[in-house]
Image (cartoon, rainbow, N blue to C red):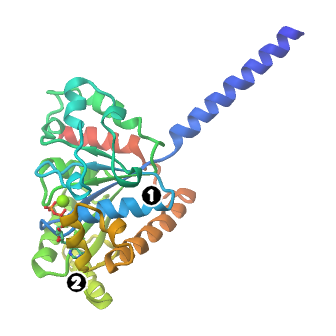
Amino acid sequence: MIFDQAEGLRRRILKANTEEKNQLSDKKTKIITVTSGKGGVGKSNFTLNFALALLGYQHRVAILDADIGLANIDVLMGVSPKLNLQDMMADKLSIWDILEKGPKGLEFIAGGSNLEFLLDPHKNDLSYLFYQFQLLNGYVDTILIDTGAGLSKESLKFILSSDEIFLVTTPEPTSITDAYAIIKSVSNKSKDVKISLIINRVTTQEEGVSTFHRIKAVTKKFLNINIQLFGFIYDDHHVTMSVKKQEPFYISYPNGRAAKSIDTLAEKYLKEREIEIVQPKKETLGIRSFIEKMTYWIKQ
Ligand SMILES: Nc1ncnc2c1ncn2[C@@H]1O[C@H](COP(=O)(O)OP(=O)(O)OP(=O)(O)O)[C@@H](O)[C@H]1O
Ligand SMILES: [Mg+2]
């Protein structure tokens, strides 16, 4: 009898532990790649300050800095990462070893100066990379991947594997045509990618709306795909001042127009995310789907 009771208790504990584990692994981490056609349109500033805004709302977020040219995010916050993704691969470190901390405890992973291991499925141990990456599932709610401008082969793989793309442009005609070129290249590979536009450096709301409509009209007409507007960020001299100080503008100038825009975007994101979690459109969201897609695109 006593044995039976003890056994029952043991089983109940085991079941509770397993349920807790499943709940954790079912928790979906959304992956968003931030990209642009033209360089210098504000991707890294957006990524960093948007992440800080989300953190302020208790949303757990991490940044992967996949800009292999010049690591931007760390410079913008005046932090130099000790280890990066390349080190993790070379020295078989764990993802926790390379997860660095920035202001307000913001967690980020530096890509390092070379992500070529993403291009050759045979040369490197990608399963090691993916195993480490999936440990983040449920640990954070959102991963933002900041990429360099234009479509490098590495960026394209991130773009095609993410749950959503934030495509940053400014109202300048050259930035608009370059954004269109990105949409065209991506849609040539896959029509499944959700592309959301961020119009940065607008001076009025109307300028933002008309920029969005111009891009939407041509993509609908020539590519037959629907893109959506994520939002605008106002042109604000505080951004440049913060870049010089190596301090995110969301922290230095929280009442500036750019920080206020970022706040609006963070609130919008969180509202949409709540709806997505209650009514998932696809079964494929999350790190597992990201890894599956990445495995596929690396082989192409
Ligand atoms: N909303 C804004 N208002 C005013 N200036 C801005 C704004 N956003 C960006 N800038 C200016 O643009 C510069 C480039 O921004 P950022 O480094 O974020 O661009 P990027 O797209 O990441 O560039 P790259 O393509 O080189 O990675 C900033 O240093 C700043 O001077
Ligand atoms: Mg950048």
Q: Amino acid at mark 2?
A: Arg
Q: Is residue 141 visible?
A: yes
| Picture quadrant of ligand 1 | bottom left
Residue for point 48% across, 66% down: 272
Mark count: 2
Single out the mark in the foreground, 2 or 1: 1
Near-viewer residue (152 or 71):
71
In this view, 265 is above or below 114: below
Crowding at mark 1 (Cα within 10 Å: few <14, some 14-19, many 20+): some
Disc sitting over residue 214 in the figure = 2
> Which quadrant is home to the C terminus?
top left
Residue 55, by quadrant, is: bottom left
x and y percentages locating residue 298 in the rendered image:
20, 40
x and y percentages locating residue 205 in the rendered image:
32, 88
Q: Are marks 2 and 1 in contact (CB under 8 Å)?
A: no
Of label 2 and label 1, which has the lower sequence position?
A: 1
Disc sitting over residue 33 in the figure = none
Near-viewer residue (294 or 124):
124
x and y percentages locating residue 233 in the rendered image:
30, 77
Q: Badge 1 is on which residue?
A: 55
Q: Is residue 194 visible?
A: no
